Every structure is written in C-alpha cells, then in structure tokens.
Amino acid sequence: GVMSHELRTPITAVYGGTRVLRSRGERLDDESKARLLEDIEQESERLFRMVENLLVLSRLELGQQVATEPVLAQRVVAKLASSFRQRRPARSLELRIDERMPPVAAEPHYLEHVLRNLLTNADKYSPLDNPIEVEASMQGDEAEIVILDRGPGIAPEETETIFERFYRSDRTSGQAAGIGLGLTVCKRLMEAQAGRVWARPREGGGMAAGITLPVYKEV
Ligand SMILES: Nc1ncnc2c1ncn2[C@@H]1O[C@H](COP(=O)(O)OP(=O)(O)OP(=O)(O)O)[C@@H](O)[C@H]1O
Ligand SMILES: [Mg+2]
C-alpha cells in the first residue's frame, strides 16, 4: 500500500546513494558528491520521522499511559525553532512568544513531537519564500501555540478529516511525500496530554494549526 511505498522510497534513496558513493565516489566531482550526500541526509531524516510517528502511534495503541509534568512550552518552541533553522536555513521562521507563559502540563518529548509534525507540514506544504510564523500565548486559562503558513490551506470541511489516519488532501497532492499519519499522531498525543490540536484555514490564504494545553496545577 501507500505506507510501504512511502517507507521504501527513502530507504532506496539512501541505499542507492551510498552505493554510488562507494563504487564511483572517486570519479565524481565535488558538487555531485555534495548533492548525493545532501539527498542521503534528507531522505534518512524523512525516514527517521516516519518511523518515529509509527512507533508513537503503536505505543499509544498498546495503551501506553502518558505522564505529564510542568513544562515551559516557550522553551520547547525555542529548541525546536533552533534545530529547524539549522536544518532549513533557507526558510524564514518568525516567532512571537509570550515569555511570561506559566508552565503547562505536558510530556516534553511528546509536546516537541507534536510541534515538529505541525512545523514539518507547514514547511512541506508552503512555498519556501513565505515565512512560517509561530505564536505562543495564553488564551484565557489555557496555553496556545499556533503555526501559520501561506500554503494551499485546507477547505473548511477538512478541518476534522485531515486528522484521520492516511487522509491526504487533494490540494496538496503531488506536492510532498507523506503517509498521512503525522496529524493523527498529533491528535492522539494531545488527547493523551489532556490538550487539543486543531487546524483552520487562515485569512488571506494558508493554514493555521495549533495546540491548546492546560496550565500545570499542583495536586
Ligand atoms: N500546513 C498544511 N497546509 C495544507 N495542507 C496541509 C497542511 N498540513 C497538513 N495538510 C494536509 O493534511 C494531510 C494530512 O497531514 P499529515 O501530517 O497527517 O500527513 P502527511 O504530511 O501527508 O504525511 P506524514 O505522515 O509524513 O506527516 C496532508 O497530506 C495535507 O494534505
Ligand atoms: Mg505531515
């Protein structure tokens, strides 16, 4: 099916690339070698992310409990932003973070995982010359983190369906590889942390995807 195809493609690219480098590496010019290495790096990263989503999903389906603790969401956003900027120097990322946000109740690795999935989507589905914006602020008594892009966006009737397993929108067909599991994982992870994830079309074009988390309360 789609999934085995999506998993095989990066494996083939990594395997093929390393074989070429080993067998013909000496005869390749520096530019071709650099391009091959860049492909290998990108494809292994993609594979790594896909496997991570599959592992998280299977753990949750086996009934894994998620323990939450006080987490400074603004720190998680800052860490994610700095690794994203290293990995994608050509893409501009604009942060608007309320540094006074109180700690939220979350599982820090899972919070980062959710935000990375949303950020990867914004990057994958929107043109490189448009910045991605990240906002973090309190909305009433909940913390909200929103990721905004200027890609094709979603139809109003897709705001729930894009979270369904294997769903991929017509609007993005052929644009980027993927299984259609990233948002399903986000939804399950946010439910396990007593939060929510949502998506809506953005005014002026593009998509807004966000998460809502309760503030940490001592028991
Ligand atoms: N920022 C976005 N702009 C427009 N469409 C989006 C955006 N994010 C998600 N979508 C749509 O929702 C679909 C489901 O997203 P999801 O992240 O679950 O899967 P995917 O990106 O296709 O694959 P993967 O499992 O690798 O994440 C996407 O295929 C795309 O059609
Ligand atoms: Mg995705």
Image (cartoon, rainbow, N blue to C red):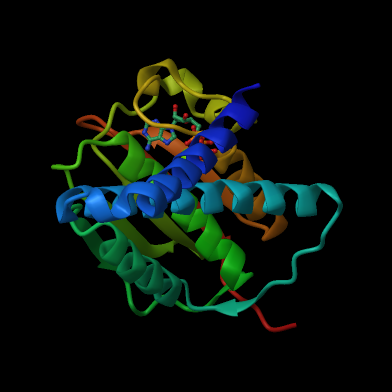
Q: Is residue 70 left or right of 97 when viewed as pictured?
A: right
Numbered marks: total = 0
Q: Position of residue 191 (x, y in %)?
A: 68, 51
Frontmost residue, 209 versus 49: 49
Q: Quadrant of residue 6?
A: top right
Give the residue displayed 20% in from the left and 52% down from the top. Answer: 91
Question: Does residue 136 appear in this view?
Answer: yes
Question: Foreground: 164 or 34?
Answer: 34
Q: Is residue 42 visible?
A: no
Eyeballing the image, is 93 above or below 77?
above
Q: Is residue 120 above or below residue 67?
A: above
Occupied quadrant, residue 108 = bottom right
Q: Residue furthest right?
A: 62
Give the image location of residue 83, x and y in percent: 35, 68
Query: Where's the N terminus, which quadrant?
Result: top right
Estimate the x, y position of residue 141 in percent, counting from the top left.
Answer: 51, 65
Which residue is painted at 55% across and 63% down in the image? 111
Residue drawn at 33 percent across, 35 percent down = 125
Q: Where's residue 63, x and y in %? A: 86, 54
Above or below — where is 113 with respect to 155? below
Question: Viewed as shown, does residue 190 lie left or right of 37?
Answer: right
Horizontal side of residue 214 vs 92, given as left or right: right
Residue at (51, 38) in percent of width and height = 12
**Quadrant of the rendering where the C terminus is positioned:** bottom right
Question: Against 112, is 200 above or below?
Answer: above
Q: Residue furthest left?
A: 129
Along the line of sight, the residue nearer the viewer: 217 or 180? 180
Q: Residue furthest top?
A: 170
Left or right position of 161 against 130: right
